[in-house]
Image (cartoon, rainbow, N blue to C red):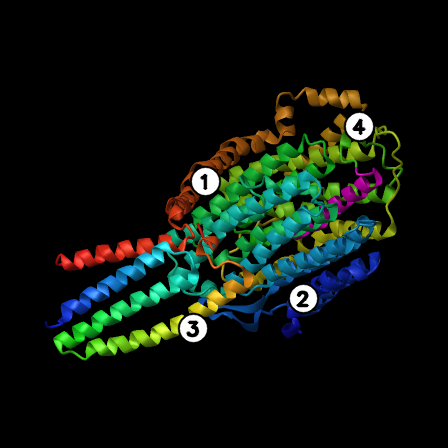
Amino acid sequence: MIVGAEWYMTVAAALFLIGAFGLLLRRNALIMFMCIELMLNAVNLTLIAAGRALNDLGGQVAVFFILVVAAAEVVVGLAIIVAIFRRRTTASVDELSELRG
Amino acid sequence: MTELVWLVIALPLAGAGFLHFAGKYLREPLAGWLASAAIGGSFVVAAVAAVPFIQGGEHGTAVSLWDWMPAIGASMEILWDPLSALMALVVTGVGSLIHIFAIGYMHGDERFHRFFTYLNLFAASMLTLVLAGNYAMLFLGWELVGLCSYLLIGFWFTRPTAAAAAKKAFIVNRIGDLGLMVGLMLVFTTFGTLSYTGIFERAGDELTSGLATAIGLLFLVGAAGKSAQVPLYVWLPDAMEGPTPVSALIHAATMVTAGVYLVARSASIFELSTVAQVTVATVGAATAIWAASIALAQRDIKRVLAYSTVSQLGYMFLAVGATAYVAGIFHLMTHAFFKALLFLGAGSVIHAMNDEQDMYKMGGLLKKMPVTAVTMGIATLAIAGIPPLAGFWSKDEILGSAFERGGWFSVLWIVGLVTALLTAFYMTRQWVLVFLGQPRWDEGIEPHESPRVMTAPLVILAVLSVFGGLINTPLRLTLEHFLEPAFELVKLQHPPEGVGMFILLAGLSVLAGLAGAAAAYLAYNRSSDEWRGFEGGFEPLWGAWEKAYGVDDIYGRVIVAPGKRAAEAAAFQFDIPIIDGAVNGLGRVFRDLGEWARPIQTGYVRNYGALFLAGTIVVVIWLVAGGA
């Protein structure tokens, strides 16, 4: 059995949907954050797979960019979450709806 | 000395500047004496600088100060010639006396120093006007004079009538100023400069008679506004709301003569247009008789003098229209003496009567205030044209010049003669009503002669009113020779030659004056019931005169009311619904848009996420389906 690009794409799609639904359904900020990471890595997987299938280094280059940006985003995001934790006892994002119009 | 002539303007200007900032630290009479010293010094400088003209043969010199607007040939330059010298002497001389009088008159006013600030500023403005070496600087003075008159008429601005009168004076003056401004633009497009010397020397060669007529008539509009001629005279009687020294300074001796000066100064332009000359003279004669008839029936002591001023200015316009410029300037000068005297005398009376201005409530003041009574009596005879007082010589020269010019001017001569009769009548009526007969004062009024600081200027002006006319009699034409260098480019109109003609014409005008004076004396030196009956005998004419022909009403209905309606329409029909509506409407559109989009922002992260996801899916489907 040859594991082709389609397999990777399928796994990536599954990962992405898990992340997306997790983001929509969970209320814990930390879990939601992990879901975002899941979605990012799903996208990374598609890029790697497509790059390999098409024999194009561009896919891997793009992944490096995403990894770097994701690392920075994690730093900022976790800092925000820690700050929220310090001020409030809960990590439920539904409590944080002050910015409604 | 001529190069120091800028001091004539600078001294009162410095006085005004100093009093503006430091005046409130000065105690009461000091501010007044300081202002008087400033203008008095200006008089001395002018007198010394005028000596070469008195010696004769001297022409004007232009003193350049600095470049102002080189593009239109307008520098700050002073034209010091006999005409401007004479005007400067009248303004500073009569002005000084009025300043001194005002020290007494304004005693106790809480804005004493401010009053003298304005007086000095006014004098500086008027001197800028008459000493200017080009039309741009003249216009600067012209506008400043209008501003100062606004400030001074409205000096007691807490009175609604004073505030309204100040506004009226300013607005009516602006109407005239528009004419002058357009005239100056026409001058500039024709000559490419506004400098007097450049214009007058080239006028004869470069100006067509049509253009000269247009410029002349536009100048007349400006002059009619400033000098209170028909139909723009309505501001001057109302301007009597100002303190009496203001009436004397602005509305008798100086500011209102600006129009006469403008025409005389522009003689080279009027020279080229008979139409403009005739129009000026006709406006003058019409104003003279119109205002004189109104003055007949006024009850307010200052209103009589206001209409009298309008009427006398009409004489001056008649003179300059007939190209008898020397006669016009001569009358301007003698009128400055006796009209300033009359106003100051009226101020003295009003002061004594606790601010009562109704002549029907005066009477019998001769014994209470002899100095005021005698000096005002002299002024009355002077303005009535009784020889040998000042008014006789100047008025007679005007009438004689009009007669000699002939044609249409003969009609104007007759108008002038009738006006002389009316003048004598209303002035004598005033004097008799105020000083003779039984006292008709209100309870509690104790009339008293005014202090020395007020009577001294009266006496000096009375002396000038008696002898001032002798500087230009047919026997000795001193003033004529003095002014000749200023008018060497134009042909001057003279009265007829010969002793016989002089006696005939002078006799006629003296007869008119005596008849008017005698009639008024006989009519009013009686009990008040009798002269009230005499006035009633002229109904309905008397009522029309007393209401000044209702001109204010007519202007109110024909011009002011439609103007107000137009302004209201613009404000409420156009500005609010359309201009404001467009701006507010745009704001409302975006506010409503925001209101509509507001529910999208729930504040729940998962809603944003869902929308994000939905958007992504839509874009993906679009791409998969073939997309762009």
Q: In this view, does A81 lie above or below B533?
A: below
Q: Would residue B345 be counted in the magenta stretch? A: yes
SS at mark 3 in the image: helix
Q: In this view, does B614 lie above or below B298?
A: below
Residue A89: percent from left, percent from top: 53, 59
Mark 2 on the same chain as mark 4: yes
Q: Which residue lies furthest to the front in this view?
A: A1
Q: Name the residue under label 2.
A: B8
Amino acid bearing label 2: Val
Give the mark nearest the N terminus, 2 or 1: 2
For marks 3 and 1, give the CA distance. 56 Å
Q: Name the residue under label 3.
A: A75
Q: In this view, does B153 lie above or below B58?
A: above
Q: Nearer the viewer, residue B588 or B45?
A: B588
Give the mark nearest the N terminus, 1 or 4: 4
- Identity of the residue drawn at 79% across and 52% down: B101
Mark 3 or 1: in front is 3
Amino acid bearing label 1: Ile
Horizontally, residue B18 falls left or right of residue A35, namely right
For marks 2 and 3, give the CA distance. 82 Å
Occupied quadrant, residue A5: bottom left
Residue B148: percent from left, percent from top: 64, 53
- Residue B125 visible somewhere in the drawing: yes
Mark 2 or 1: in front is 1
Q: Name the residue under label 1.
A: B576
Q: Name the residue under label 4.
A: B525
SS at mark 4 in the image: loop
